[in-house]
Amino acid sequence: MIQYGADRVVKVEHSDLQVYTTDAYQQALLQVLDVEKPAGIVMGHTAQGKDVAPRIAVKLEAGLVSDAVNLEMDGEEAVFTVPIYAGKTFEKMKVKGLVLATIRPNNIEPLEKDESRSGDVPNVQVQIKATFLLQLVSQVPSSI
């Protein structure tokens, strides 16, 4: 991610994060966000992003923009483009304050890879409370 424009990437490793569960990822993300204090949080509009983003937004008392297809900055304010009316038209939303957003995959062109870039990649330790965690009992191989 550094080579695609990020200045800092936080790396989190924990045995309970090897397989996605809402509770484990929510706990880990909240701990990282508490330390990092970002101005905004952007996630993919994937099954996981759609699952965990609203939960994080509620815990942080932050706004949530879901299924955005574009993100621009207007000074210090984020401007998201989101589809409305079943995708027949689009609306621009200007957001102030802390906001979480899910971005529809493949809608924003990635920056060109720059092998010469370097950045900060700290390892962050998190504590996952197993009280509410679901446990994977078995995994059936996909035949698709």
Image: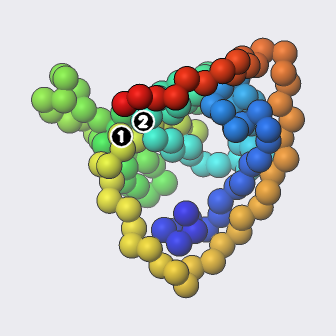
x, y percent for residue 118:
63, 77
Label 2 to label 1, Cα distance in Å? 5 Å
Which quarter of the image is occupied by the N terminus?
bottom right
Placement of 112 over or under 11, stated as above or below: below
> Which mark is first along the chain, 1 or 2?
2
Question: Which residue is at 44% across, 34% downward?
Answer: 46
**In the foreground, 107 or 68:** 107
Mark 2 crowd level (few <14, some 14–19, many ≥20, 10 Å Cα): some
**In the foreground, 62 or 107:** 107
The colour scheme used to paint the residues is: rainbow
Looking at numbered disc 2 in the image, what kind of residue is underneath it? Answer: His
Residue 59 quadrant:
top right
Question: Which residue is at 42% across, 35% downward?
Answer: 45
**In the foreground, 17 or 110:** 17
Asked if residue 60 can be seen in this view, the reply is no
Which element carries disc 2, helix, strand or loop? loop
Placement of 26 over or under 4, stated as above or below: above
Q: Which label number is shown at residue 45?
A: 2
Question: Which residue is at 39% across, 67% downward?
Answer: 111
User: In the figure, is residue 83 to the left or right of 60?
Assistant: left
Question: Which residue is at 38% across, 62% downward?
Answer: 110
**In the foreground, 125 or 133:** 133
x, y percent for residue 53:
55, 30
Mark 1 crowd level (few <14, some 14–19, many ≥20, 10 Å Cα): some
For the residues labelled 2 and 1, say whether their Cβ atoms are less than 8 Å apart.
yes
Placement of 103 over or under 16, stated as above or below: below
Q: Which label number is shown at residue 2?
A: none
Q: Which label number is shown at residue 104?
A: 1
Looking at numbered disc 1 in the image, what kind of residue is underneath it? Answer: Arg
x, y percent for residue 115:
52, 81
Asked if residue 38 can be seen in this view, the reply is yes
